[in-house]
């Protein structure tokens, strides 16, 4: 079957009788965008609800951080296997199951009556979101021709940022009016709608690696590596923490060796050696997310516990960053179809680094106008970086690796987010111990400033990685 000029899916599919290839493309983009909206909406809304969760369960800052960390760890562990499973068993199938798992686990989060149950439900939610991350971008990339890839990826990225934009304000309102469980209930009808639309509109299936074996040993080694790393990073500096991190690094090395030796790897690490654009674009994404993700977590607590804002007002302030992302991501995506994506992404990384450096001067008296200006700068930088960088990654691989490449995009994002939260958690644990943030706001501000300095340095290093990727359109993508 042909979709797009000269573009073959490479396997038989069943189509709705009343849908032509163009309608299929639009349906795929709409459904992928809806699911791309859900997970960031949930993440940003939950960040606003963090102080309410902390107060309701009577937990300290370190345990509270695991409400976010458990989700990120589960998503990072499941993402690469989910991408490979999608290539083998069908991206539509994995996409539907991911939506169902994400939606049902959101309801379980809302029903949790203890921190342990909430964290457990967040783990399940992370697995569902990984299945969405690994398939949505791959489906959209498969049905659109290469000359439109940047534009449609820009739309998909914009959906992510619309979710980030709506999350803080909606999360603040829901938490204020109904309590934090309402944040989790809010995504249930949207998730069910995404499942219904997929079943009704998207009848195609994509499985270019159908029949190949699934690499269970590699998946388990990968899961162990990330788990050890995250557990080690979340502990205060200690022998146990260092041992866990070292064990995680050893497991990562073992994972890479296994992937090179097995005939059907869960993640073909040779992609990094085949394409300079692919490898450096992935590294740039890893660094960018590591330098930015925990900023939302830190700012949510800062605005409510240090500045004394209610959840709704804090959400309004924090909306300034994702609104810029949503507005400028489609433009950045279109530009990356005409201008070398690496140039635009590097400019975005530079703006992000500038915004982070400005935030390092935060204290209890910093004006809200200054904070909003910094968040706007961060949002613009993120918009200019993200969709061009995804365009570079997806454009650097063959069609049969779209699921793996989409998994790599999500993996770099989640590994970066996990590392970012790990750094923030480590600093908070070192400076505050087991104190709640409300009991020691000055120590929290000190911790946040240290973390922001580290993130600034990471982002500056990321600029050099981004500039070193080579050119996607000059033949260097495969060198």
Image (cartoon, grey):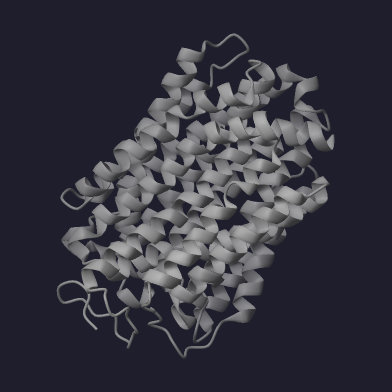
How far across and down, in percent of the image, does residue 333 sit?
A: 26, 48
Instruction: Estimate the x, y position of residue 350 in percent, counting from the top left.
Output: 35, 33
Q: Position of residue 69 (x, y in %)?
A: 67, 48
223 up-or-down from 58: above or below: below
Q: Please say whether residue 365 is visible from this viewpoint.
A: yes
The residue furthest bottom is 211
Residue drawn at point x = 47 percent, y = 24 percent: 357
Residue found at the very far front of the displayed protein: 18
Image spot of residue 341 (x, y percent): 25, 50
Instruction: Indicate the quadrant containing the C terminus: top left, top right, bottom left or bottom right.
Output: bottom left
Location of the N terminus (image quadrant): bottom left
Q: Is residue 11 above or below residue 320?
A: below
Residue 272 in sight from this viewpoint: no
Which image quadrant is residue 47 in?
top right
Identify whether 234 is placed above or below 169.
below
State the image quarter where residue 308 is shown. Answer: top right
Q: Is residue 307 above or below residue 391?
A: above
The answer to which of 323 and 357 lies nearer the viewer is: 323
Quadrant position of residue 107: bottom right
**Between 311 and 197, the one nearer to me in the picture:** 197
Q: Residue at x 71, y 48 (%)?
A: 110
């Amino acid at each position: 079957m042909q979709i797009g000029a000269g573009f073959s899916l490479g396997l038989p599919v069943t189509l709705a009788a009343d849908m032509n290839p163009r309608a299929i493309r639009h349906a795929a983009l709409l459904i992928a965008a809806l699911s791309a909206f859900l997970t960031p909406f949930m993440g940003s809304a939950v960040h606003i609800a963090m102080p309410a969760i902390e107060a309701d369960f009577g937990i300290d800052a370190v345990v509270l951080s695991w409400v976010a960390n458990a989700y990120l760890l589960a998503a990072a562990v499941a993402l690469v296997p989910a991408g490979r499973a999608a290539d083998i068993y069908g991206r539509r199938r994995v996409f539907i199951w991911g939506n169902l798992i994400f939606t049902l686990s959101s309801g379980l989060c809302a029903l949790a009556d203890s921190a342990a149950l909430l964290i457990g439900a967040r783990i399940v939610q992370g697995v569902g979101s990984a299945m969405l991350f690994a398939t949505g971008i791959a489906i959209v990339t498969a049905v659109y021709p290469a000359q439109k890839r940047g534009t449609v990826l820009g739309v998909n990225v914009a959906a992510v940022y619309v979710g980030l934009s709506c999350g803080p304000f909606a999360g603040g309102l829901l938490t204020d009016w109904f309590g934090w469980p309402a944040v989790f209930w809010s995504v249930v009808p949207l998730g069910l709608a995404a499942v219904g639309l997929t079943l009704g509109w998207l009848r195609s299936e994509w499985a270019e690696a159908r029949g190949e074996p699934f690499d269970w040993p590699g998946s388990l080694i990968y899961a162990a590596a990330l788990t050890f790393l995250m557990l080690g990073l979340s502990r205060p500096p200690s022998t146990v923490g260092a041992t866990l991190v070292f064990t995680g690094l050893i497991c990562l090395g073992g994972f890479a060796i296994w992937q090179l030796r097995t005939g059907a790897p869960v993640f073909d690490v040779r992609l990094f050696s085949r394409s300079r654009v692919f490898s450096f674009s992935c590294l740039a994404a890893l660094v960018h997310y590591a330098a930015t993700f925990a900023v939302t977590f830190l700012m949510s607590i800062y605005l409510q516990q240090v500045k004394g804002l209610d959840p709704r007002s804090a959400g309004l302030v924090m909306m300034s960053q994702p609104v810029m992302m949503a507005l400028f991501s489609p433009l950045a995506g279109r530009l990356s179809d005409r201008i070398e994506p690496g140039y635009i992404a590097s400019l975005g990384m530079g703006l992000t680094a500038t915004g982070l450096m400005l935030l390092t001067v935060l204290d209890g008296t910093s004006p809200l106008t200054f904070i909003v200006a910094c968040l706007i700068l961060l949002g613009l930088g993120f918009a200019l970086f993200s969709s061009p960088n995804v365009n570079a990654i997806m454009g650097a691989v063959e069609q049969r690796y779209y699921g793996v490449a989409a998994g790599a995009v999500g993996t770099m994002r989640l590994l970066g987010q996990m590392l970012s939260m790990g750094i923030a958690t480590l600093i908070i644990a070192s400076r505050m111990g087991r104190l709640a943030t409300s009991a020691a706001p000055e120590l929290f501000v000190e911790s946040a400033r240290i973390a922001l300095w580290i993130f600034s340095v990471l982002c500056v290093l990321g600029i050099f990685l981004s500039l070193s990727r080579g050119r996607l359109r000059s033949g260097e993508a495969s060198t």
